[in-house]
Amino acid sequence: MPRMILLLAVALTLIILIRRAQRQPPHKRRSAYLQIILGSAVVGVVILTLMGKMHWIGAALTGALVLARQMLPLLIRILPMLGGLRGQGPSAAGKQSEVASRILKMTLDHDSGDLSGVVLEGTYRDWLLEELDREQLDDLMAFCQREDADSAQLLASYLEQRFPDEASHTEHNTHGGSANATGLTRAEALAVLGLGDEASEEDIVSAHRALIQKLHPDRGGNDYLAAKINEAKDFLID
Protein backbone atom coordinates (compact mmCIF):
# COMPACT_ATOMS: atom_id res chain seq x y z
CA MET A 1 0.00 0.00 0.00
CA PRO A 2 2.70 2.61 0.85
CA ARG A 3 4.43 1.78 -2.44
CA MET A 4 1.20 2.32 -4.37
CA ILE A 5 0.62 5.67 -2.66
CA LEU A 6 4.17 6.73 -3.52
CA LEU A 7 3.70 5.79 -7.18
CA LEU A 8 0.42 7.69 -7.36
CA ALA A 9 2.04 10.75 -5.79
CA VAL A 10 4.90 10.60 -8.30
CA ALA A 11 2.48 10.18 -11.22
CA LEU A 12 0.33 13.12 -10.06
CA THR A 13 3.40 15.31 -9.65
CA LEU A 14 4.56 14.42 -13.18
CA ILE A 15 1.15 15.31 -14.63
CA ILE A 16 1.19 18.70 -12.89
CA LEU A 17 4.74 19.45 -14.03
CA ILE A 18 4.02 18.42 -17.63
CA ARG A 19 0.93 20.62 -17.78
CA ARG A 20 2.92 23.51 -16.34
CA ALA A 21 5.64 22.96 -18.95
CA GLN A 22 3.03 23.00 -21.74
CA ARG A 23 2.01 26.50 -20.65
CA GLN A 24 5.59 27.78 -20.98
CA PRO A 25 6.66 29.85 -24.02
CA PRO A 26 7.95 27.56 -26.79
CA HIS A 27 11.61 28.50 -26.25
CA LYS A 28 11.35 27.44 -22.60
CA ARG A 29 9.45 24.18 -23.07
CA ARG A 30 12.46 22.07 -24.01
CA SER A 31 14.28 23.13 -20.87
CA ALA A 32 11.17 22.48 -18.77
CA TYR A 33 10.74 18.97 -20.21
CA LEU A 34 14.43 18.25 -19.66
CA GLN A 35 14.11 19.34 -16.03
CA ILE A 36 11.20 16.93 -15.62
CA ILE A 37 13.20 14.08 -17.14
CA LEU A 38 16.22 14.78 -14.94
CA GLY A 39 14.05 15.14 -11.84
CA SER A 40 12.28 11.88 -12.62
CA ALA A 41 15.63 10.14 -13.06
CA VAL A 42 16.84 11.41 -9.69
CA VAL A 43 13.64 10.31 -7.95
CA GLY A 44 13.84 6.89 -9.60
CA VAL A 45 17.47 6.45 -8.56
CA VAL A 46 16.74 7.49 -4.98
CA ILE A 47 13.84 5.06 -4.74
CA LEU A 48 15.87 2.20 -6.21
CA THR A 49 18.78 2.98 -3.89
CA LEU A 50 16.55 3.04 -0.81
CA MET A 51 15.02 -0.26 -1.89
CA GLY A 52 18.52 -1.74 -2.20
CA LYS A 53 18.19 -2.34 -5.94
CA MET A 54 20.90 0.12 -7.00
CA HIS A 55 24.43 0.59 -5.71
CA TRP A 56 25.22 3.96 -4.15
CA ILE A 57 27.89 4.56 -6.81
CA GLY A 58 25.22 4.54 -9.50
CA ALA A 59 23.21 7.06 -7.48
CA ALA A 60 26.28 9.27 -7.09
CA LEU A 61 26.99 9.18 -10.84
CA THR A 62 23.39 10.11 -11.61
CA GLY A 63 23.61 13.05 -9.21
CA ALA A 64 26.86 14.20 -10.82
CA LEU A 65 25.29 14.10 -14.28
CA VAL A 66 22.30 16.12 -13.09
CA LEU A 67 24.59 18.68 -11.45
CA ALA A 68 26.65 18.99 -14.65
CA ARG A 69 23.48 19.61 -16.65
CA GLN A 70 22.38 22.29 -14.18
CA MET A 71 25.77 24.03 -14.40
CA LEU A 72 25.84 24.08 -18.22
CA PRO A 73 23.79 27.32 -18.66
CA LEU A 74 26.09 29.08 -16.18
CA LEU A 75 29.18 27.96 -18.10
CA ILE A 76 27.62 29.14 -21.37
CA ARG A 77 27.11 32.60 -19.84
CA ILE A 78 30.59 32.75 -18.35
CA LEU A 79 32.54 31.81 -21.49
CA PRO A 80 31.59 34.95 -23.49
CA MET A 81 32.50 37.06 -20.45
CA LEU A 82 35.93 35.45 -20.34
CA GLY A 83 36.36 36.26 -24.01
CA GLY A 84 35.50 39.88 -23.26
CA LEU A 85 38.26 40.03 -20.65
CA ARG A 86 40.85 39.20 -23.30
CA GLY A 87 40.85 42.66 -24.70
CA GLN A 88 37.69 43.23 -26.68
CA GLY A 89 37.22 46.98 -27.00
CA PRO A 90 34.16 49.20 -26.57
CA SER A 91 33.03 48.52 -30.14
CA ALA A 92 32.25 44.91 -29.16
CA ALA A 93 29.29 46.18 -27.15
CA GLY A 94 27.79 47.99 -30.13
CA LYS A 95 26.20 44.99 -31.78
CA GLN A 96 22.65 45.48 -30.54
CA SER A 97 20.38 48.24 -29.34
CA GLU A 98 17.73 47.63 -26.71
CA VAL A 99 14.52 49.60 -26.16
CA ALA A 100 12.15 48.60 -23.39
CA SER A 101 8.62 49.64 -22.54
CA ARG A 102 6.23 48.41 -19.91
CA ILE A 103 5.06 45.41 -21.98
CA LEU A 104 7.87 44.77 -24.49
CA LYS A 105 11.63 44.67 -24.71
CA MET A 106 12.87 45.06 -28.29
CA THR A 107 16.34 44.42 -29.65
CA LEU A 108 17.74 45.80 -32.91
CA ASP A 109 20.64 43.97 -34.52
CA HIS A 110 23.02 46.59 -35.91
CA ASP A 111 24.40 44.43 -38.70
CA SER A 112 21.18 43.02 -40.12
CA GLY A 113 18.71 45.65 -38.92
CA ASP A 114 16.44 42.85 -37.69
CA LEU A 115 14.11 43.47 -34.76
CA SER A 116 13.38 40.86 -32.11
CA GLY A 117 11.57 41.11 -28.82
CA VAL A 118 10.17 39.51 -25.72
CA VAL A 119 6.86 40.14 -23.97
CA LEU A 120 7.22 41.34 -20.38
CA GLU A 121 3.61 41.42 -19.26
CA GLY A 122 0.19 40.00 -20.04
CA THR A 123 -1.10 36.73 -21.51
CA TYR A 124 2.07 36.15 -23.55
CA ARG A 125 4.54 37.05 -20.84
CA ASP A 126 8.03 35.63 -21.55
CA TRP A 127 7.08 34.71 -25.13
CA LEU A 128 9.42 35.76 -27.93
CA LEU A 129 7.67 37.79 -30.62
CA GLU A 130 8.82 35.38 -33.33
CA GLU A 131 6.97 32.59 -31.49
CA LEU A 132 3.64 34.40 -31.91
CA ASP A 133 1.52 33.97 -35.04
CA ARG A 134 -0.37 36.85 -36.63
CA GLU A 135 -3.55 36.27 -34.64
CA GLN A 136 -1.60 36.24 -31.37
CA LEU A 137 0.29 39.37 -32.38
CA ASP A 138 -2.98 41.16 -33.11
CA ASP A 139 -4.22 40.11 -29.66
CA LEU A 140 -1.01 41.44 -28.14
CA MET A 141 -1.37 44.69 -30.07
CA ALA A 142 -4.89 45.18 -28.71
CA PHE A 143 -3.53 44.65 -25.20
CA CYS A 144 -0.71 47.14 -25.79
CA GLN A 145 -3.10 49.75 -27.16
CA ARG A 146 -5.27 49.43 -24.05
CA GLU A 147 -2.43 49.44 -21.54
CA ASP A 148 0.62 51.28 -22.89
CA ALA A 149 1.04 53.47 -25.98
CA ASP A 150 4.84 53.08 -26.07
CA SER A 151 4.46 49.29 -26.21
CA ALA A 152 2.00 49.63 -29.08
CA GLN A 153 4.53 51.76 -30.96
CA LEU A 154 7.29 49.19 -30.40
CA LEU A 155 5.08 46.34 -31.54
CA ALA A 156 4.06 48.32 -34.63
CA SER A 157 7.75 48.63 -35.48
CA TYR A 158 8.14 44.87 -35.30
CA LEU A 159 5.00 44.24 -37.37
CA GLU A 160 6.19 46.62 -40.07
CA GLN A 161 9.34 44.56 -40.45
CA ARG A 162 7.85 41.09 -40.12
CA PHE A 163 4.83 41.77 -42.34
CA PRO A 164 6.05 44.43 -44.81
CA ASP A 165 3.34 43.65 -47.38
CA GLU A 166 0.44 44.10 -44.99
CA ALA A 167 -1.04 47.51 -44.33
CA SER A 168 -3.16 46.79 -41.26
CA HIS A 169 -0.36 47.42 -38.80
CA THR A 170 0.16 50.97 -40.05
CA GLU A 171 -3.02 51.95 -38.23
CA HIS A 172 -1.41 50.91 -34.97
CA ASN A 173 1.49 53.24 -35.57
CA THR A 174 -0.80 56.27 -35.54
CA HIS A 175 -1.84 55.66 -31.95
CA GLY A 176 0.28 57.24 -29.29
CA GLY A 177 2.00 59.83 -31.49
CA SER A 178 5.73 60.38 -31.43
CA ALA A 179 8.03 59.28 -28.65
CA ASN A 180 8.17 61.51 -25.60
CA ALA A 181 10.96 62.00 -23.12
CA THR A 182 10.64 59.31 -20.50
CA GLY A 183 13.32 60.15 -17.96
CA LEU A 184 16.06 57.93 -19.37
CA THR A 185 18.94 56.87 -17.19
CA ARG A 186 22.46 56.79 -18.62
CA ALA A 187 22.40 52.98 -18.69
CA GLU A 188 19.10 52.96 -20.62
CA ALA A 189 20.34 55.55 -23.11
CA LEU A 190 23.55 53.58 -23.72
CA ALA A 191 21.49 50.40 -24.23
CA VAL A 192 19.38 52.16 -26.87
CA LEU A 193 22.57 53.01 -28.78
CA GLY A 194 24.13 49.62 -28.12
CA LEU A 195 27.09 51.06 -26.19
CA GLY A 196 28.88 50.16 -22.98
CA ASP A 197 29.60 52.33 -19.95
CA GLU A 198 33.02 53.28 -21.27
CA ALA A 199 31.61 54.88 -24.44
CA SER A 200 33.07 58.26 -25.35
CA GLU A 201 31.23 61.18 -26.93
CA GLU A 202 32.74 60.17 -30.26
CA ASP A 203 31.37 56.61 -29.79
CA ILE A 204 27.93 58.03 -29.03
CA VAL A 205 27.88 60.25 -32.10
CA SER A 206 29.12 57.43 -34.32
CA ALA A 207 26.56 54.92 -33.01
CA HIS A 208 23.76 57.45 -33.37
CA ARG A 209 24.75 58.24 -36.95
CA ALA A 210 24.90 54.59 -37.96
CA LEU A 211 21.57 53.72 -36.37
CA ILE A 212 19.66 56.74 -37.61
CA GLN A 213 20.75 55.93 -41.15
CA LYS A 214 19.06 52.53 -40.78
CA LEU A 215 15.90 53.75 -39.05
CA HIS A 216 15.20 57.30 -40.14
CA PRO A 217 11.59 57.61 -41.39
CA ASP A 218 12.75 59.42 -44.54
CA ARG A 219 14.60 56.23 -45.52
CA GLY A 220 11.65 53.95 -44.86
CA GLY A 221 12.59 53.31 -41.27
CA ASN A 222 10.54 53.64 -38.13
CA ASP A 223 9.78 57.05 -36.64
CA TYR A 224 9.28 55.75 -33.08
CA LEU A 225 12.63 53.95 -32.88
CA ALA A 226 14.38 56.85 -34.61
CA ALA A 227 12.93 59.21 -32.00
CA LYS A 228 14.17 56.93 -29.21
CA ILE A 229 17.66 56.91 -30.70
CA ASN A 230 17.66 60.71 -30.99
CA GLU A 231 16.44 60.99 -27.40
CA ALA A 232 19.22 58.72 -26.14
CA LYS A 233 21.92 60.67 -28.01
CA ASP A 234 20.60 64.03 -26.74
CA PHE A 235 20.50 62.76 -23.18
CA LEU A 236 24.08 61.47 -23.27
CA ILE A 237 25.66 64.50 -24.94
CA ASP A 238 23.63 67.52 -23.85
Image: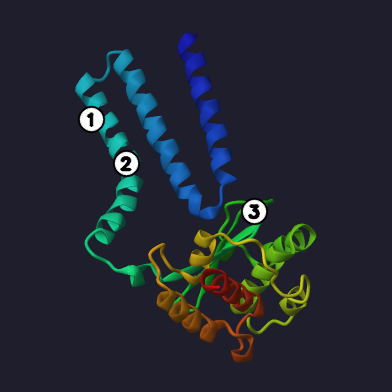
- x then y, percent, for residue 97: 49, 69
Marker disc for residue 139? none
Label 2 environment density (alpha carbons within 10 Å; few <14, some 14–19, many ≥20) = few
Residue 55 visible in the snapshot: no
At numbered mark 3, what does the secondary structure look like: helix, strand or loop?
A: loop
In the foreground, 85 or 30: 85
Label whose residue precedes the other's in the sequence (3 or 1): 1
Q: Nearer the viewer, residue 57 or 202?
A: 202
The image shows residue 189 at horizontal and vertical percentages of 53, 66
Tell me the kind of residue under disc 1: Leu
Identify the residue shown where x is 49% and y is 66%: 190
Whole-angstrom CA distance, mark 3 to mark 2, is 28 Å
**Tag 1 or tag 2, which sits nearer the N-term?**
1
Q: CA distance from mark 3 to mark 1?
A: 39 Å
Return the residue at label 3: 124
Tell me the mark number nearer the camera, choosing from 2 and 1: 2
Residue at screen point 64% across, 78% down: 160
- In the picture, the disc for residue 61 is 1
Under mark 3, the amino acid is Tyr
Left or right, 168 with respect to 227, comes to right
Residues 163 and 219: in front is 219
Outermost residue to the front: 238
- Kindly indicate whether the residue at mark 2 contacts the one at mark 3 (C-beta within 8 angstroms): no
Q: Toward the viewer: 14 or 180?
A: 180
Q: Secondary structure at mark 2?
A: helix
Give the labeled residue for mark 2. 71
**Picture layout, residue 201 above or below residue 38:** below
Query: Regarding mark 1 in the picture, which secondary structure is present there?
Result: helix
Question: Left or right: where does residue 219 sit relative to residue 67?
Answer: right
Q: CA distance from mark 2 to mark 1?
A: 15 Å
